[in-house]
Image (cartoon, rainbow, N blue to C red):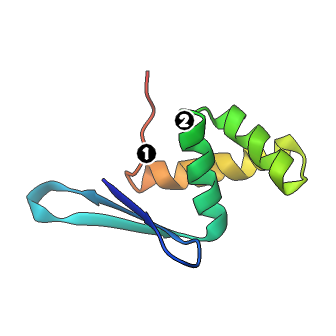
Amino acid sequence: MSVTVDADGRLDVCVAQDFGRYRHLRCSPVGTAMWIALRQHGGDVDAAADMLAALWGTEPENARADLGIWVDEMRDAGLVRDEA
């Protein structure tokens, strides 16, 4: 997996697939912030959402819902997975 952030704060995630194919996903700066928050909190969605809510001045429930939707999109794209 390769992850880069451009000068505009856009995240680009690239994951190698089978047979030399790659899967790419580009995120807005908000998605970039969510990625960083998740990485900083070891994938703990609740802790990442609490941090983002504090930074963005919003209710933790709203940040958690937005982050949950984003994580689902990343999972559907095959770029994140649940760990047991």
The residue at the far front in this view is 7
Residue 44: % across, % down: 61, 32
Quick check: 29 above or below 47?
below
User: In what element is the residue under mark 1?
Assistant: loop
Residue wearing tag 1: 80
Counting other residues with Cα less than 10 Å from the Cα at mark 2, is it few (<14), some (14-19), or many (20 or more)? some
Residue most toward the bottom? 8
> What's the mark number on residue 54?
none
**Left or right of 18, for residue 29:** right
> What is the three-letter code of the residue carrying label 1?
Val
How far across and down, in percent of the image, does residue 9 sit? 58, 71
Label 2, label 1: how many angstroms apart (C-alpha)? 10 Å
x and y percent of residue 12 in the render? 43, 67
Between residue 41 and residue 20, name the one nearer to us.
Answer: 41
**Residue 74 as seen in the image, left or right of residue 2:** right
Which callout, 2 or 1, points to the residue nearer the camera?
Answer: 2
Label 1 Cα neighbours within 10 Å, binned few <14 / some 14-19 / many ≥20:
few
Residue with the mark numbered 2 = 43
Quadrant of residue 30 in the image? bottom right
Looking at the image, which residue is at 64% across and 57% down?
33
How many tags in the picture? 2
* Residue type, mark 2 in image: Gly
